Image (cartoon, helix red, strand yellow):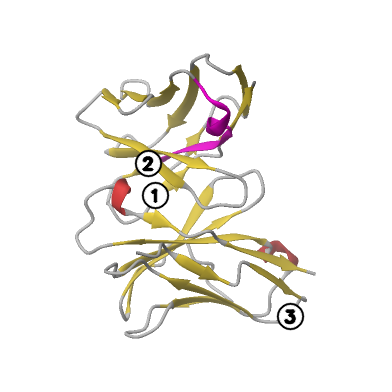
Amino acid sequence: NAGVMQNPRHLVRRRGQEARLRCSPMKGHSHVYWYRQLPEEGLKFMVYLQKENIIDESGMPKERFSAEFPKEGPSILRIQQVVRGDSAAYFCASSPPGFSGGETQYFGPGTRLLVL
Amino acid sequence: GESVGLHLPTLSVQEGDNSIINCAYSNSASDYFIWYKQESGKGPQFIIDIRSNMDKRQGQRVTVLLNKTVKHLSLQIAATQPGDSAVYFCAENHNFNKFYFGSGTKLNVKP
């Protein structure tokens, strides 16, 4: 059973470009969470999605950031017109329906975004 | 928003010694806490959790203590091994769909 997969693992963009980060949850998991981690800091919650629904986006910047989790395919975190401050590691986590504890939430390896 | 912070940014211990990592949280409504281990270049890995109706929980070589009175959480690692070297985060949760992470403590285990 493959774990949570994220790609790309590393992404370099120039200011003003778009970044697309993908997350494939574990098999059987229908809940996806995105977090951002700046160097030497903890993870900051961004958004929580279920299939075709955004449940909680209270941690998402109001502009330039969007997320989706379509019926088919991976979850996508999209950052438009990237700026240097977007440089960070972006982690995805997934969990099965009916949250039962942290041991059922698995994190992917992250995508490290560098904006030049 | 919630605030979860750690007292010590870096902790160095000798192999075989016990380690204690501390965490303070600010949201008294939080009812569920997790300790994560993050190795370099990897995502966080669940270690142990505790619910607010408990004050202690033990796992394999790890123990989590919760003091709700002072809003303090600690992780104790017994007989620390080189493989325990990582950054440790506490995280709090009160609605089961997102976690608030502290800033992390780096644990260095000296052989």
Visible residue check, residue B30? no
Q: Amino acid at mark 3?
A: Gly
On the image, numbered disc 3 is attached to which residue?
A16
Q: Which mark is residue A7?
A: none
Residue range corresponding to the magenta coloring: B80-92
Distance Cα–Cα, label 1 vs label 2: 6 Å
How packed mark 2 is, by other alpha carbons closer than 10 Å (few <14, some 14-19, many 20 or more), is many
Visible residue check, residue A76? yes
Side of A17 relative to B106 (left or right):
right
Q: Mark 1 — on which chain does it sit? A: B
* Residue found at x 26% / y 38%: B31
Q: Which mark is residue B92?
A: 2
Distance Cα–Cα, label 3 vs label 1: 31 Å
Distance Cα–Cα, label 3 vs label 2: 35 Å
Residue extending farthest right: A116
- Secondary structure type for disc 1: loop
